Image (cartoon, rainbow, N blue to C red):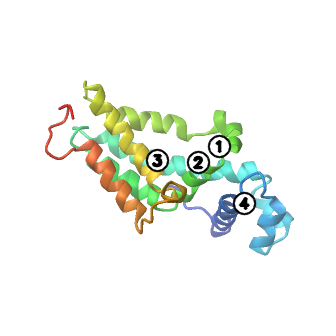
């Protein structure tokens, strides 16, 4: 990951994210975050003045990691041939440290509205959609590529599987995403 962050900063982010996911963004206070960390609010303020600052830092860190995936994707001479690897790289990102951030974003839509103008992820997702559909004229193939990215994000959300016991949701999401970008038994652009 670009630019190593301090352990304290990462610990604050993780504890805050855990609380945001457990009880919701609106119901979580800086006091609760400080208590869970075992520090004073003043110590927390040294790193983050507000909950919004914490969320912004999480979004910025995720955006930096997405930039690395995008930089790799831009360097590929054959975008169609690189789709599967792009999906694998995004799956690793979603299954790793940033899966909980994406779940937080899905579960806290009202709170995310205030970050709309400041959310660095929207433009990056738009670029990923363009890259995954690059060189494709068939709208169905372009849609499958976009749905593959959505499958990675949605398939890693625990509430998505609430009624279906799945031991490895990330693995299932990756399998579906790969099938969407490279359907077996068909060539790219061939209708289903």
SS class, disc 3: helix
Q: Earlier in the sequence, mark 2 or mark 4?
A: 4
Label 3 CA crowd tier, 10 Å (few <14, some 14–19, many 20+): many
Nearer the observer: mark 2 or 3; the answer is: 2
Q: Earlier in the sequence, mark 1 or mark 4?
A: 4
Q: Which residue is mark 3?
A: 66
Q: Nearer the viewer, residue 135 or 169?
A: 169
Q: Earlier in the sequence, mark 2 or mark 3?
A: 3
Disc sitting over residue 109 in the figure: 1
Does residue 31 appear to the left or right of 154 in the view shown?
A: right
SS class, disc 1: helix
Disc sitting over residue 87 in the figure: none
- Asked whether residue 98 appears in the rendered view, the answer is no
- Image coordinates of residue 152 in percent, x first then y, are 41, 50
Nearer the observer: mark 1 or 3; the answer is: 1
Cα separation, mark 1 vs mark 2, equals 6 Å
- Image coordinates of residue 102 in percent, x first then y, are 55, 51
Quarter of the image for residue 14 reads bottom right
């Amino acid at each position: 990951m670009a630019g190593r962050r301090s352990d304290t900063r990462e610990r604050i982010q993780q504890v805050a994210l855990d609380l945001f996911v457990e009880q919701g963004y609106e119901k979580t206070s800086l006091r609760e975050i400080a208590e869970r960390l075992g520090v004073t609010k003043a110590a927390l303020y040294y790193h983050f003045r507000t909950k919004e600052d914490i969320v912004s830092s999480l979004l910025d860190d995720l955006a930096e990691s997405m930039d690395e995936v995008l930089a790799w994707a831009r360097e590929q001479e054959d975008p169609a041939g690189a789709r599967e690897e792009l999906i694998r790289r995004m799956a690793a990102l979603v299954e790793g440290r940033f899966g909980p951030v994406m779940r937080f974003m899905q579960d806290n839509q009202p709170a995310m509205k205030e970050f709309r103008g400041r959310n660095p992820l929207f433009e990056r997702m738009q670029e990923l959609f363009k890259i995954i559909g690059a060189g494709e004229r068939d709208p169905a193939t372009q849609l499958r590529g976009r749905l593959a990215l959505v499958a990675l994000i949605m398939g890693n959300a625990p509430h998505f599987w609430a009624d279906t016991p799945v031991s490895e949701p990330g693995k299932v999401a990756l399998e579906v995403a790969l099938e969407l970008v490279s359907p077996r038994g068909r060539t790219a652009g061939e209708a289903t």
